[in-house]
Image: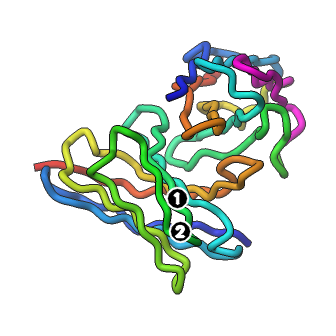
């Protein structure tokens, strides 16, 4: 069965970086884009970007340009999202989600809480 | 960027009620519109894709309609497990989500 499993919660200081992993299983890893979406406490969903696990090509939302990197390791079916120069308003749950071209985001990770606090 | 506007932002309803949530895009997005349900502490769950197609395993009381810029999610008979927040999402261009609609118990 398809599973998307993320790394655990992180606590970071302002100005630091965080790297969240997302391991996929149960399907052809290189066949589906993986997207990152975040949700601040009590707020809605915010799309951050995607990575094509086959080519490594990425696209990011304008507001994260210059601060976010997405990479993949096909040998372990894992993608990574790194966010740098963290601020308090980056405190959020970060989700990765598989994008099925015709269907939408059909499988989601459990979410990773990133807390930015001095 | 395409902006997605949902209404209402919240509603109160009783078990058995028919519930309708609307989503409007800032430009035409054809039928590239998906609906998700999110419960507290959980990841969103895909309900409807392509504006009107029911995702596998989702109860038939959920339905979606619309095309172009105006879309609707309908729950025909609200069940206790349906109290949640609902989001629309466009995938016509770089994805974006609506602000959400919280469905609460009356």
Marked residue chain, label 1: A
Q: Is residue A112 left or right of residue B75?
A: left
User: Which residue occupies 32% across, 46% down?
Assistant: A65
Q: Quickly name the residue at label 2.
A: A5
Asked whether A95 or A85 is in front, the reply is A85
B73 in the magenta segment: yes
Q: Quickly name the residue at label 1.
A: A110
Provide residue B50's location: percent of width, then percent of height: 78, 37
Provide residue A74's location: percent of width, then percent of height: 53, 80
Q: Secondary structure at mark 1?
A: loop
Asked if residue A76 shows in the view, the reply is yes
Marker count (numbered): 2
- Report if the CB atoms under discs 1 and 2 are less than 8 Å apart: yes
Q: Quadrant of residue B31?
A: top right
Marked residue chain, label 2: A
User: Which residue occupies 38% across, 39% down?
Assistant: A62
């Amino acid at each position: 069965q398809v599973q998307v499993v993320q790394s655990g919660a992180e606590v970071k200081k302002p100005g630091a970086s965080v790297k969240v992993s997302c391991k996929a299983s149960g399907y052809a890893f290189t066949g589906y884009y993986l997207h990152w979406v975040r949700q601040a406490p009590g707020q809605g969903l915010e799309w951050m970007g995607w990575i094509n696990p086959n080519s490594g090509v990425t696209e990011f939302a304008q507001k994260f340009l210059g601060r976010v990197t997405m990479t993949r390791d096909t040998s372990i079916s894992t993608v990574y999202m790194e966010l740098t120069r963290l601020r308090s308003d980056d405190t959020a749950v970060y989700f990765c989600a598989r994008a099925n071209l015709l269907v939408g985001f059909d499988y989601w990770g459990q979410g990773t809480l990133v807390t930015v606090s001095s | 960027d395409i902006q997605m506007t949902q209404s209402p932002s919240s509603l109160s309803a009783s078990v058995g009620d028919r519930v309708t949530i609307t989503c409007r895009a800032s430009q035409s997005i054809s039928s590239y519109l998906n609906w998700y349900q999110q419960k507290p502490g959980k990841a969103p769950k895909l309900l409807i894709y392509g504006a009107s197609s029911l995702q596998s395993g989702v109860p038939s009381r959920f339905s979606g309609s619309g095309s172009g810029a105006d879309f609707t999610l309908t729950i025909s008979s609200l069940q206790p497990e349906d109290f949640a927040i609902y989001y629309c999402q466009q995938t016509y261009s770089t994805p974006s989500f609506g602000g959400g609609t919280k469905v609460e118990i009356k």
